[in-house]
Image (cartoon, rainbow, N blue to C red):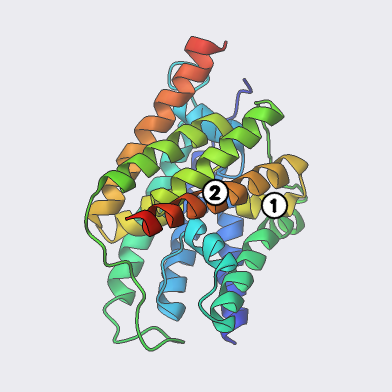
């Protein structure tokens, strides 16, 4: 039941990403290309997702516990540090080059397109590379 | 460069579905719908149960395009206007960035912003600016 519901939630997310255009690098890059072939569609994706989630969270997080767990696992860190800003800046550079973000690429894998598989393989390699350099940093300090 | 059509209704509907999925994941498992966190945790799961929900969620995500195809008769468009080298370099950079930045468009941009998390707001503003500047530089300064 728990896994079936989680699968269906992934499916809703995957359909949402697919019809929104976030799985299409050409559309994502055009959103940022205000000086060129601008396509403002992604404002509607972000707006729709943000407003829906904001309202949804207001209703859900007021509960004593989630349906299948004993408590909420919401990030509690509120510190804005150099690592957060530098990492986000680096992510922005990569997103601007490739046009895929992780949430766009993972559902796009379902199209079977080799470009998505290549991007996702590189994405996973990048995650491992960063985890490795982070672990070196932690042992040194 | 490939021109793309302005699709406010489909994009808004997609965004609302993303929001519904994020809300339902919080309702059922009490977790944020961050693609980076879900994917990274798959390789270092805290338990077999932790692995299972991540795998189920990813399997659902990957099934999305097939359902769209069943309903509309068309696979979602994936148009890649860049070289394979740029795609792979971009993928590596995204992987490093989202790991250090602890989130991406879904985790920070949607779920974190919806919780009004100061970290997520700072992260989202940062990556949106850097993405925009990168696209401008690639298309209008170095390329084009």
Label 2 crowd (10 A; few <14 / some 14-19 / many >=20) = some
Mark 1: give few (<14), some (14-19) or many (20+) Cα within 10 Å.
many
Label 1 resides on the chain identified as: A
Q: Residue B54: x, y in percent?
A: 57, 71
Please indicate, yes or no, whether residue B76 appears anywhere in the rendered image: no
Residue at image point 56% right, 12% down: B143
Q: Which of B135 and B71 is in front in this view?
A: B135
**Quarter of the C terminus of chain A within the rendering:** bottom left
Q: Is residue A127 left or right of residue B84?
A: left
- Name the residue carrying label 2: A129
Q: What element carries label 1?
A: helix
Going from the N terminus, do you reach mark 1 or mark 2 first?
Answer: 1
Give the Cα separation between the discs numbered 1 and 2: 22 Å
Q: Residue B58 carries which label?
A: none
Task: Work out whether residue A83 or residue A116 is closer to the camera in this orientation and state it.
Answer: A83
Q: Which chain carries label 2?
A: A
- Whether marks 1 and 2 lie on the same chain: yes
Residue at the image point whose x is 22% and y is 59% from the top: A78
Q: Which residue is drawn at 34% across and 86% down?
A: A65
Residue A62 appears in the rendering:
yes
Q: Which residue does the numbered mark 1 point to in the structure image?
A: A109
Is A121 placed left or right of B105 in the picture? Answer: right
Quarter assignment of residue A14: bottom right
**Which of label 1 and label 2 is nearer to you?**
2
Tag 2, which secondary structure? helix
């Amino acid at each position: 039941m728990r896994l079936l519901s989680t699968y269906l939630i992934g499916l809703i997310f995957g359909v949402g990403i697919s019809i929104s255009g976030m799985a299409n690098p050409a559309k994502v890059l055009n959103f940022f290309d205000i000086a060129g072939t601008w396509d403002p569609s992604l404002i509607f994706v972000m707006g729709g997702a943000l407003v829906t989630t904001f309202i949804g969270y207001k209703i859900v997080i007021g509960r004593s516990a989630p349906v299948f767990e004993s408590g909420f696992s919401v990030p509690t860190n509120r510190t804005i540090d150099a690592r957060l800003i530098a990492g986000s800046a680096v992510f922005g550079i990569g997103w601007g080059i490739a046009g895929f973000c992780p949430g766009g690429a993972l559902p796009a894998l379902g199209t079977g397109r080799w470009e998505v598989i290549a991007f996702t393989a590189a994405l996973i390699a990048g995650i491992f590379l960063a985890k490795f350099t982070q672990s070196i940093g932690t042992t040194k300090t | 460069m490939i021109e793309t059509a302005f699709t406010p209704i489909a994009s808004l509907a997609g965004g609302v579905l993303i929001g519904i999925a994020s809300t339902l994941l919080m309702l059922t498992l009490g977790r944020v719908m961050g693609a980076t966190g879900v994917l990274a945790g798959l390789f270092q799961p805290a338990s077999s149960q932790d692995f299972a929900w991540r795998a189920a969620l990813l399997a659902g995500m990957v099934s999305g395009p097939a359902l769209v195809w069943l309903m509309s008769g068309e696979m979602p468009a994936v148009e890649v206007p860049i070289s394979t080298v740029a795609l792979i370099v971009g993928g590596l950079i995204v992987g490093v960035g989202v790991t250090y930045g602890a989130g991406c468009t879904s985790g920070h941009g949607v779920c974190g912003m919806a919780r009004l998390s100061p970290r997520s707001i700072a992260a989202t503003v940062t990556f949106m600016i850097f993405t925009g500047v990168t696209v401008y530089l690639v298309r209008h300064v170095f390329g084009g």
